[in-house]
Image (cartoon, helix red, strand yellow):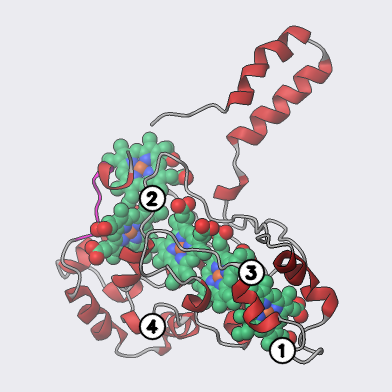
Amino acid sequence: MSVRFPVWMNVLPTLGAIGGAVGLIVVIGVVTTYFTPKYWEVGYMPTQPGSGFSHQIHAGKLGLDCRYCHTNVEKSAEANIPPVSTCMGCHTDGMLSPTYDPAEKVEFIRTAWTADESIPWARIHKLPDYVRNFPHHAHINAGVSCYSCHGQIEAMPVVYQAEALSMSWCLDCHRGVGQAMHGDADPSQYLVPKDKVTELEWVETVWHGEGEGQRAAASAVLAGIRQAPPENCGACHY
Ligand code: HEC
Ligand code: HEC
Ligand code: HEC
Ligand code: HEC
Ligand code: HEC
């Protein structure tokens, strides 16, 4: 593993030479910011542009499927953020009633659209550079729900990081699924039927004990996984 220092770190010796209190404070500020990336922390919830985007309204109340916007999530490693055109499918002036489309709340969408710019959404979940491209599609197609890794998104007015995304967190599930393949663990805490991966309310209900028979369903999903999830370093690191 290597830690790469950004180019601007080259100014550190110069600042040190100035030696003044101001320089020192800048150095401390810079180093603290660089070495404690807030985006790896559970609960991380950056401020979003405009009036933001509510998953509680769109995915919860309106019931839009995750893949309506995150169109690539089961096809590629990367889960894409939708372009402004996806929003304009509904938020074009006059399309929704003004009660549901209050100008002051959706103006930032139309402004971006008119200017042909994207909305600068703040990134929330981000693995460090020394971890290989995280494969969304492999997980979704194996029956791992978004809920396992992102929490109850359908209830979030503003998305925050619900899970640690640490190495031991990844490996806990990988080991658990491996053990379940040998009959030594219950697969239903890790896997759901493929058609339920984006139905987070269903998943939450099942996992809170109201889903009789889910173990049999998860065992059927497990049977479709040919290789145990990897635990070797090279699978996740360069
Ligand atoms: C109508 C479009 C839309 C739908 C439907 C939708 N999302 Fe999103 N999603 C977005 C947009 C826009 C963002 C970026 C703004 C934000 O983070 O709130 C986003 C961000 C996210 C993020 C955070 C990304 C990051 O920066 O780490 C996650 C996780 C996520 N969505 C999961 C889901 C899940 C799970 C569902 C289904 C239950 C879903 N989304 C449904 C549009 C959508
Ligand atoms: C399928 C139609 C649809 C799509 C696509 C859609 N919206 Fe909406 N949006 C709605 C509806 C309907 C409401 C009003 C819901 C309500 O208030 O109950 C709404 C409400 C909103 C609001 C006001 C929320 C509030 O706080 O009252 C914002 C902001 C918004 N949407 C942003 C977005 C953004 C950004 C996108 C694209 C990532 C998007 N919408 C995509 C249908 C849509
Ligand atoms: C096994 C865990 C896991 C599952 C399942 C999962 N994600 Fe993620 N998701 C992650 C991780 C880890 C990241 C950060 C990836 C990175 O930094 O490379 C992420 C990032 C994202 C992002 C941000 C992408 C970006 O470029 O800003 C979105 C959006 C997202 N996930 C949506 C979803 C949706 C929708 C689902 C379900 C259909 C889902 N995820 C299922 C772990 C998961
Ligand atoms: C809740 C369970 C769960 C979590 C959490 C999880 N994984 Fe996985 N992962 C799986 C399963 C199940 C597979 C097996 C997919 C298959 O072989 O079909 C898998 C497979 C993989 C693969 C191999 C993909 C392939 O193409 O064969 C990689 C790489 C991987 N996971 C990385 C990660 C990383 C990195 C994290 C943490 C950020 C993580 N996983 C978290 C369940 C999980
Ligand atoms: C399933 C995926 C996965 C596997 C397999 C894996 N790692 Fe990691 N590793 C990660 C993730 C994700 C992180 C980033 C954790 C974070 O951001 O806190 C990480 C972080 C690290 C770090 C940085 C320090 C730390 O603990 O955060 C080291 C060193 C490391 N891994 C070494 C290894 C070695 C050695 C192996 C093989 C024995 C291995 N990893 C196997 C996913 C994996």
The amino acid pointed to by label 3 is Val
Of the numbered discs in the image, which one, if any, rests on residue 95? 1
Report the residue marked by disc 2: 133
Q: Is residue 225 left or right of residue 118?
A: left
Ligand 3 lies under 8 Å from the Cβ of mark 2: yes
The amino acid pointed to by label 2 is Asn
CB contact under 8 Å: marks 3 and 2: no
Task: Tell me the SS state at disc 3.
Answer: helix
- Residue 181: image x %, image y %? 17, 67
Report the residue marked by disc 4: 196
Instruction: Assess disc 1: are there few (<14), some (14-19) or many (≥20) residues with their C-alpha within 10 Å of its C-alpha.
Output: few
Q: Quadrant of residue 213?
A: bottom left
Instruction: Assess disc 2: are there few (<14), some (14-19) or many (≥20) residues with their C-alpha within 10 Å of its C-alpha.
Output: some
- Residue 151: image x %, image y %? 51, 69
Ligand 2 lies under 8 Å from the Cβ of mark 3: yes
Task: Tell me the SS state at disc 2.
Answer: loop
Ligand 2 lies under 8 Å from the Cβ of mark 1: no
Report the residue marked by disc 3: 84
Please say whether residue 230 is one of the residues in the magenta stretch.
Answer: yes
Instruction: Work out how far the residue at label 4 is from the one at label 2, CA to CA, in angstroms.
Output: 25 Å
CB contact under 8 Å: marks 4 and 3: no
Instruction: Work out how far the residue at label 1 is from the one at label 3, CA to CA, in angstroms.
Output: 16 Å
Could you tell me which residue is drawn at 76 percent across and 83 percent down?
Answer: 93
